Image (cartoon, rainbow, N blue to C red):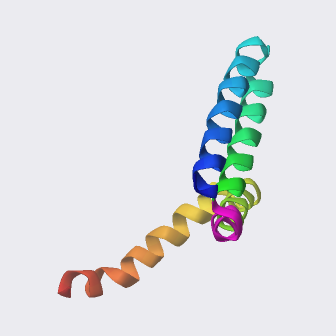
């Protein structure tokens, strides 16, 4: 058996136990945090260093959503679209 197959089988068993743990966990926020944590651990174990870009992008996007006003983001998106509209029409 290849090392990747062993890791895959271990993750399947871990996810089964995590599912049982989610069933007994009370509270919506606690379940969300538990499932998110298990998901991040599985991604890190499977992808190793290849997941760093995705995790970094997710954290940056979350910070943008938390720290930047929605009105500013919508304004910026509209201005960017208006700037790119002529270019998009030619492609």
Residue 15 percent across, percent down from the top left = 66, 32
Instruction: Say whether residue 52 is magenta.
Output: yes
Vertical comparison of 44 with 12: above or below: below
Quadrant of residue 11 within the rendered picture: top right
Vertical comparison of 38 with 87: above or below: above
At horizontal 46% and vertical 76% (from top left) the residue drawn is 79
Vertical comparison of 33 with 26: above or below: below
Residue nearest the viewer, comparing 9 with 17? 9
Residue 34 percent across, percent down from the top left = 77, 32
Q: Quadrant of the C terminus?
A: bottom left
Q: Is residue 77 left or right of residue 25?
A: left
Residue projecting furthest to the left = 90
At horizontal 64% and vertical 70% (from top left) the residue drawn is 50
Residue 70 percent across, percent down from the top left = 62, 55
Residue nearest the viewer, comparing 25 with 17? 17
At horizontal 64% and vertical 61% (from top left) the residue drawn is 47
Instruction: Say whether residue 61 is magenta.
Output: no
Magenta range is 47-55
Q: Is residue 37 left or right of residue 71?
A: right
Quadrant of residue 49 within the rendered picture: bottom right
Magenta stretch: dominant secondary structure? helix
Residue nearest the viewer, comparing 29 with 20? 20
């Amino acid at each position: 058996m290849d090392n990747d197959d062993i890791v895959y089988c271990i993750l399947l068993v871990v996810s089964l136990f995590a599912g049982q743990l989610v069933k007994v966990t009370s509270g919506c926020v606690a379940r969300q945090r538990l499932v998110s944590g298990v998901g991040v651990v599985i991604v890190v174990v499977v992808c190793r260093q290849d997941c760093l870009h995705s995790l970094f992008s997710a954290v940056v996007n979350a910070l943008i959503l938390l720290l930047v006003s929605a009105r500013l983001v919508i304004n910026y998106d509209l201005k960017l679209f208006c700037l790119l509209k002529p270019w998009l029409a030619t492609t």
